[in-house]
Image: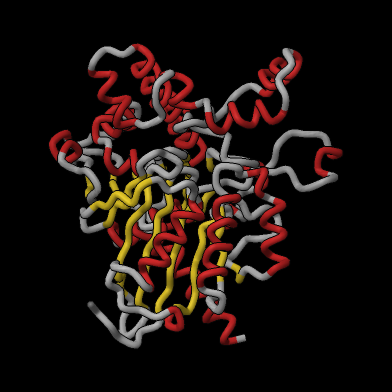
Amino acid sequence: MESDNAAHVLAFNAGSSSLKFEFFATQPAWRSRIRGAVEGIGRPQSLIRFADGTREHPGAVADPAGAARLIIDRLLDGDLAVGTAAADVMGCGHRVVHGGEHFSAPVRVTHSVHERLAALAELAPLHNVHALAVMEVVRGRLPDVPAIAVFDTAFFRDLPEPARVYALPDAWHAHGRIRRYGFHGIAHEYLSLRLRERCGRVPERVLSLQLGQGSSIAALRNGAPVETSMGFTPLEGLIMGTRPGDLDAGILLHRMRQGDSWPALDRDLNFRSGLLGLSGVTADVRELVALEAGGHPGATLALAAFCHRIHKYLGAYAAVLGGVDVVVFGGGIGENAPGLRARICAGLAWLGLEIDGAVNAGCAGDEACISKGSSKIEVHVIPVREEEAIARAALRCLKSEEVQ
């Protein structure tokens, strides 16, 4: 068991069916002590998957709050062997998907901040409510440890106004600013910074793809976002695991005329649409790829529609940027599905993008440049370390408070 006097930062990244975590020492040098994820939350058998490849089956974990309780207890008192006392945890960073108009930088979560975040929960029902529940667990188990909220919307706070606005009546803004906030900002910013390190420069025109159960594309010019596919909520944009992405608002009016209630629409749009809705069987791309290989028509349609929507956005954002210098893939699908990456890249062949088939096929969960040397566009795969970004942002927030 390792034991030292280093100060530590804990990071939690709560989703609807998983909780990712990472525990960092900040002294004498920054280093990850342990990281992993509790997966299959809400299922009869959950799984703890660690970064070193080991797995554990803790039984059924009902919700992300229960997963946080499990991880904290084992980090401090159990058998995860980090040898750290509660008094040595200086802060806990939490990914919060929607920061609304008020929050555009990491912030310590006070009672008033917690209340304001709770009021935003309906705008990101798959995530915000779980992040708040995890905060409550941490506060109960580690009452003296500050909670720091790190926002997915912050990276897009300065989107150009033409990309930020919806063409709606002024009266609609009376009870809260309706605008395009953008999401997955922690991931897209990480991809941008890591890409800069890999390339040794800031690429001028970048298409950043964060593809997973939630998926989004951002167009970056000199490292700053000028467009992104998600909008007022994480429902807009690409086809996702259980969310439809772009749809005609008239469909909602039609369903309401047919008698659907708002709760029913909310449930269907957030939990029953997307790849799950199209395939009729699953939202898991790994399962869909296997089903497609076996001739399953729903899986074939779901994956074809998924790639088609991405191609539409890639073409549109290439026009917004006036060309493309680099494409970067992140997220569970972007990092681990070479077959889908190849399909997506084929949609940019007209721009002179060429990938190395062998390099692409061999890249799963690793950093790599998968484009050919003759390609006019570089293509990179970069595994996103959101938890590290969250922890570093939390530490910066705490240190800035010390200076003040």
Tally the marks.
0
Q: Residue at x 29, y 52 (%)?
A: 49
Compared across the picture, whether 347 is left or right of 266 comes to left
Q: Quadrant of residue 96?
A: bottom right
In this rendering, is residue 324 above or below 88?
above
Q: Quadrant of residue 385?
A: bottom left
Q: How is the image coloured?
A: secondary structure
Image quadrant where one finds the C terminus: bottom right
Q: Nearer the viewer, residue 262 or 48?
A: 48
> Residue 351, position in %: x, y?
34, 31
Image quadrant where one finds the N terminus: bottom left
Q: Nearer the viewer, residue 7 or 301?
A: 7
Q: Residue at x 59, y 65 (%)?
A: 105
Q: Nearer the viewer, residue 13 or 2?
A: 2
In this rendering, is residue 146 above or below 150?
below
In this rendering, is residue 323 above or below 366?
above
Compared across the picture, whether 83 is left or right of 21 comes to left
In this rendering, is residue 250 above or below 382?
above
Q: Residue furthest left?
A: 358
Residue 331 shows in this picture: no
Residue 49 shows in this picture: yes
Q: Nearer the viewer, residue 376 or 369?
A: 369
Q: Residue at x 48, y 51 (%)?
A: 64
> Residue 288, position in %: x, y?
32, 25
> Residue 366, position in %: x, y?
22, 50
Q: Quadrant of residue 190?
A: bottom left
Q: Residue at x 47, y 46 (%)?
A: 62
